[in-house]
Amino acid sequence: RSGRDYARERTITIDATDGLTPADIEALQEAGVEVSVIGLETGTVTGKKGATVEALATIADSDVDGFDLLVIPGGGAPENLRIDDDAVEFTRRFVDSGKPVASICHGPQLLISAKVLSGRTVTAVNKIRDDIVNAGDEPMQVYAVYAPSHHAKGIVHETAADAEADEKSGKDT
């Protein structure tokens, strides 16, 4: 089964706060994924360049068991989420549940604060590479990437290579 099929069959939660990259959410929705946006508060969340999304529930009131996949968006959201105890604890519980977690761009900042990176391989924007390396208590492999579309397209693919091949060929994800 492809990553796209997996994502479409699951309820995905997005931890959101001001500064997120709305394109991360839009890419998933365009791929037919059921997305539930949760935030520090309910209501409108303002992302980069003024785009908005609606958080229908708070992170504090959300249960890890209600979701199949956690997506931590890029942009400035992870920096804002990592200082909120409820967001950090929700993330830690999600990782501990064994369910998949996708972090985009600066997303690993929240994973660092949840202290769940030790022994893991992480992909992130190169600006936080040193933060990730310093977060583990053992050597870690870090893949710093540049995503030209800055979208969550890779989540609906089986591998990053599939996403790259689709983008090069002009295929719609």
Image: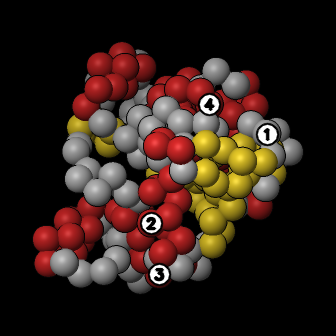
Q: Earlier in the sequence, mark 4 or mark 1?
A: 1
Q: Disc 4 to disc 1, how far (Cα)?
A: 11 Å
Q: Is residue 7 visible?
A: no
Task: Point out which mark residue 41 bears.
Answer: 1
The front one of 97 and 159 is 159
- Near mark 4 (Cα within 10 A), the count class, few <14, some 14-19 or many ≥20, is many
Q: Which residue is mark 3?
A: 5
Mark 3 vs 4: CB contact within 8 A: no
Q: Earlier in the sequence, mark 2 or mark 3?
A: 3
Tell me the residue that label 2 is attached to: 27
Marks 1/3: CA distance?
A: 31 Å
Cα separation, mark 2 vs mark 4, equals 21 Å
Q: Does residue 85 appear to the left or right of 2 in the view shown?
A: right
User: What is the x, y in percent for residue 172?
Assistant: 30, 80
Q: Residue at x 25, y 31 (%)?
A: 126
Helix, strand or loop at disc 1? loop
Q: Which residue is mark 4?
A: 81
**Amino acid at pointer 2:** Ala
Q: Earlier in the sequence, mark 2 or mark 4?
A: 2
Q: Are marks 2 and 1 in contact (CB under 8 Å)?
A: no
Question: Is 97 placed above or below 92 here?
Answer: below
Q: Residue at x 63, y 38 (%)?
A: 17
Please state which of residues 162 and 39 is positioned toward the viewer in this rendering: 39
Residue 51: x and y in percent read: 54, 50
* Sooner in the amino-acid sequence: mark 3 or mark 4: 3
